[in-house]
Amino acid sequence: MNKYEALVERLREINNINNAVSVLSWDQQTSMPPGGAPARARQMGTLARIGHELFTDEATGRLLNEAENEVDDVYESDAVSMLRVVRKDYSEATRLPAAFVAEFTQLTALAHEVWAKARAASDFAAFAPTLEKLLELAHRGAEYLGYEEHPYDALLGRYEPGMTTRRVGEIFDAHRPVLTSLINRISAAPQVDDSAVRRRFEVAQQREFGLMVIQKMGFDMQRGLQAISVHPFCTSFSVNDVRITTRFEDDFLNPALFGMIHEAGHAMYEQGVAQHLDGTPLANGTSLGVHESQSRMWENIVGRSRGFWSWALPHLKTAFPQLSDVSDEAFYRAINKVERSFIRVEADEATYNLHIILRFEIEKDLLTGALAVKDLPRAWNERFETYLGVVPPNDALGCLQDVHWSAGLMGYFPTYALGNLLSVQYYDAAVTAHPDIPAQIARGEFGTLRQWLGQNIHQHGRKFTAEELTRRITGGSIDPAPYVRYLEAKFTDVYGL
Amino acid sequence: MNKYEALVERLREINNINNAVSVLSWDQQTSMPPGGAPARARQMGTLARIGHELFTDEATGRLLNEAENEVDDVYESDAVSMLRVVRKDYSEATRLPAAFVAEFTQLTALAHEVWAKARAASDFAAFAPTLEKLLELAHRGAEYLGYEEHPYDALLGRYEPGMTTRRVGEIFDAHRPVLTSLINRISAAPQVDDSAVRRRFEVAQQREFGLMVIQKMGFDMQRGLQAISVHPFCTSFSVNDVRITTRFEDDFLNPALFGMIHEAGHAMYEQGVAQHLDGTPLANGTSLGVHESQSRMWENIVGRSRGFWSWALPHLKTAFPQLSDVSDEAFYRAINKVERSFIRVEADEATYNLHIILRFEIEKDLLTGALAVKDLPRAWNERFETYLGVVPPNDALGCLQDVHWSAGLMGYFPTYALGNLLSVQYYDAAVTAHPDIPAQIARGEFGTLRQWLGQNIHQHGRKFTAEELTRRITGGSIDPAPYVRYLEAKFTDVYGL
């Protein structure tokens, strides 16, 4: 066994431990009885510590150095990519001192409770001191990790490797005013009626219909499953064991249906990684932005398209005869209703990126201190009004709504918006290669699109960075123009602008 | 921190790893999609190896030696018990060489497939060579572990610490002829009609009724849950997270209902261990025999009693109106039907121990070589006819029926029968202390019995050996006489002998 092979072998063992932690977390969120929480925290803590110790051990660093000297720098070789991502992960893991990681873990464990209570009471002042500490730790973390231009770069880079704060700012500035203008025009038009999706829908039938749809799309139930949880998510323990969760509402069709398609989009990415990468550090999505491009493409570009519902609506009406009076057009408009709403996770396609842009600008300023924590609610509300034309009536519907900051996830939000942009760029490339894709979707056939995604994105896992992947697919870089064109065309039509 | 505390701290960490393996196994048996199997085997393998390495490491041995010198030998102190069980576990774990454990793990992984196919085809010859190897390993294992009198002692002692082959033989010899004679008298009497429990029963209703019953008995759903699996089992990740599984049949009430009560009996034992022992080596049942005494007491002595059904039958009839025509007496007899059946897991109370006694005698002879593997089917069938009066028509219904040998579980079977004996001894002691217990059960009140069990058995975990526990409770040792008296009285009545 050469050094490279020895390194990969060691990383596979560590991966087994990390994947075991993910199984424990899955069980915690989908099954565990309340009494199990303290023991589960101890079990996950022990395994995470062992995995971290093995990964940051000198032995890993030595093997990594030796493997880097041994492997020839051949572009597109798995080995070169493997060493690139391991070097990145190893640097991040070893730059953060153990004492800092422990402090961070402790604070976020407590912060979640504080935040949940503050949000329930819509009491920002109750969360402010904790947020101060979280920001202080985020700042220290950025210093440990290192950055060239902006401390936010260090945080962002953990979720979107290679992306910079400056570039995100440029991308966001380039499409924010167009979105605001689109929303203004939509708001001036007569609102669409979404009563069709707000009837009674039996949860069991919702689940059955959703499973039929995502399996048609390509989610493989031999190598995955679906369960129920409070917050929907996708997790993976292997290329061959990828799971999603759903939250059902019995009087609103959208959350579960589009939620299942969204999570299945993530899951198909993970299931599509090449088998020979299974268990290695390359066997996941390459960035959160690219991951989100997959979930959003299936949820929105496919799942909220007229073509898709020309195939799917008759099936939905069989499952829910109460929809028999709903026309194709009325249903299509109902699922594409645009609203100036306050909550990001419920936002429609047209407003979604504005929710993200606002967060990016605010957390960047919080990190540098350009915005003081005490001024956050005011800054949030002012910006919200500028971008979306309305003011949140309270902080629960404003700056307290997201779980991310309390979990220490700063620099994470931009990946949602980047994913939306990439979803259209990638879909356009797929249709350029296979112009028949939209017609196939209208027949309930998703194989060509899925295979194209598998070939061009999924199989590679982390082999290419988001930037490389996008260049290989589009010949260019991430670009908001196709997304804006897509939204303009779609909502001009839906709202008859 | 003194050495004893350092030892316990180290063992808690190891326990976290072992409990994580149990969570992975639970998920594997209740949820995992088929594709997940290879990755799951790798994850469990890595964690089991780490747990084993940490436990058998010199550091554990050193701490154990030091703690033994440090702790005063005070009877009934937790520390003394802790050191006793750790010394036992440590000796067992360190006496088996790593190469032997690896060989054993590999063989049993393959053996399961070989056995499953052989059983499906009722082809003993296909399993025989594998069984030879399993026995050879069992024998080597016994030599490594060490024993005073009989190699079977070493295997038996892993499941029933302190019990010997000689003693089991005496206990079994003392009640085998009485059971055979009872079966003969029952078989001469008119058979009871069990058609009442062999109707259509909706699985969802079965589950709901079963959950109502076991919660009434004391299974705590805040600290446990129930799921579905092919083979019912109970597992525990903490005193506060104890889970059971059920297998449902939609045309036979017994398997799921009595299966749920049985597993809940195990689960209440695990849930009842004192909170301060949680996460330590004392936080489990003290032996498989004592564990089985709890499951069998709730399943049979309580769950198959006339009193229990005077309370439960009206509730069952509400759940299943199709039972409205069934009298109390007809129902009671239906659930207590005795049959000379071939399959142990379906055996009734009267025949069950005979199935076990036969296995004990045979595996003991296989281990010493007194019985050759090729002669096993003949020996099985001959003995079956002597004890139970019928001959299995094929080996799938005979010597190929159990999973145990293929899993390397030799010396395990006797604990089932010992559990039956203990269940009556313990129940009699509870009723002696609280003569009102039977009347309470007939009112659906189980608190007094459960609290007595909690006080006298559950809370102690592994603190006392089975022998000590039985002496504390009964003043004597394990004894088949109460069990025989119980069966005689019950079935003389059921069959009007």
Image (cartoon, coloured by chain):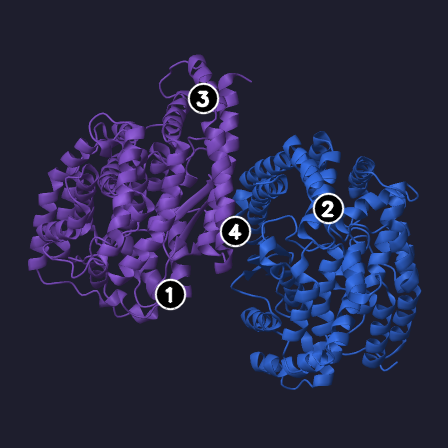
Chain colours: A blue, B purple
Percent across and percent down for residue A114 are 72, 42
Secondary structure at badge 3 equals helix
Answer left or right for B358 relative to A259.
left
Mark 1 vs mark 2: tell me if same chain: no
| Residue B319: mark | 1
Residue type for callout 3: Gly
Secondary structure at badge 4 equals helix
Which residue lies at the image location 62% right of the left edge and 85% below the top edge? A324
Answer left or right for B312 relative to A467.
left
Residue type for callout 1: Ala
3 or 4: mark nearer the eye: 4
Secondary structure at badge 2 equals helix
Chain letter belonging to callout 4: B
Q: Which residue is mark 3?
A: B61
Residue type for callout 2: Arg
Chain letter belonging to callout 3: B
Count residues near mark 3 (Cα–Cα under 10 Å), then give few for <14, some for 14-19, many for 20+: some
C-alpha separation, residue under disc 3 versus residue under disc 2: 42 Å
State if disc 2 and disc 1 touch (CB < 8 Å): no
Name the quarter where the C terminus of chain A is drawn. Answer: bottom right
Percent across and percent down for residue A12 are 58, 44
1 or 2: mark nearer the eye: 2
Secondary structure at badge 1 equals helix
Q: Which residue is mark 2?
A: A84
C-alpha separation, residue under disc 1 versus residue under disc 2: 62 Å
State if disc 3 and disc 1 touch (CB < 8 Å): no
Residue type for callout 4: Ala
